[in-house]
């Protein structure tokens, strides 16, 4: 299970992966054993004023196939996509859309109210709303003079 730390930057690895993908795509014969398999879809995470928003594109997936859970600061996404029906494995000339079971876990910031996390799924787009906990503001306490 992959757990990414909050604000961890893996951009150099993504650049390397894109370069390897370009190299392998330029070859005239399929090399599925050499391709870097991406068993999990990429996600985007945004910080808004009131919440964090995690998005994932999951074409060909239904909401019944998704399992989203949050527990003790870990957000976990699971999915089980069935394999395409009626196509034998030896007929594939390119295989980029994933199927099967995958799982991703993310460490979420302490500032998230886990009890209010919600998810919606429309037209293959998963949106997970991670509402921020209201910050406790210091309260000014008035000092009252008491008679001596």
Image (cartoon, grey):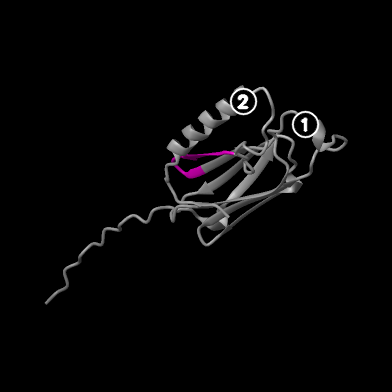
Q: Position of residue 58 (x, y in %)?
A: 67, 37
**In the image, is residue 48 part of the stretch drawn in magenta?**
yes
Local secondary structure at mark 2: helix
Residue bounds of the magenta highlight = 42-52
Label at residue 65: none
Number of labelled discs? Answer: 2
Q: Is residue 73 left or right of residue 59?
A: left
* Residue 4 at x, y percent in the picture: 49, 50
State the residue in front, 33 or 103: 33
User: According to the image, label 2 marks what residue?
Assistant: 25
- Determine the residue positioned at 72% across, 29% down: 94
Q: Main secondary structure of the magenta part?
A: strand
At 84% from the left edge and 36% from the top edge, which residue is drawn?
88
In the image, residue 146 lies at what x, y percent? 17, 72
User: Where 122 falls versus 23 (above or below)?
Assistant: below
Residue at image position (73%, 42%) is 99
**126 with respect to 114 (left or right):** right
Residue at which label 1 appears:
92
The answer to whether 138 appears left or right of 132 in the picture is: left
């Amino acid at each position: 299970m992959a757990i990414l730390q909050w604000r961890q930057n893996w951009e150099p690895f993504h650049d390397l992966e894109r370069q390897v993908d370009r190299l392998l795509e330029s070859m005239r014969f399929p090399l599925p054993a050499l391709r870097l398999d991406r068993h999990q879809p990429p996600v985007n995470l945004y910080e808004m004023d009131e919440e964090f928003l995690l998005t994932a594109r999951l074409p060909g997936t239904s909401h019944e196939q998704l399992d989203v859970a949050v527990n003790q600061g870990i957000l976990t996404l699971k999915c089980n996509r069935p394999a395409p029906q009626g196509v034998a494995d030896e007929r594939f000339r390119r295989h980029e859309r994933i199927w099967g079971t995958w799982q991703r876990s993310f460490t979420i910031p302490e500032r998230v109210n886990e009890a209010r996390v919600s998810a919606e799924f429309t037209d293959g787009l998963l949106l997970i709303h991670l509402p921020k906990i209201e910050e406790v503001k210091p309260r000014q306490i008035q000092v009252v003079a008491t008679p001596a």
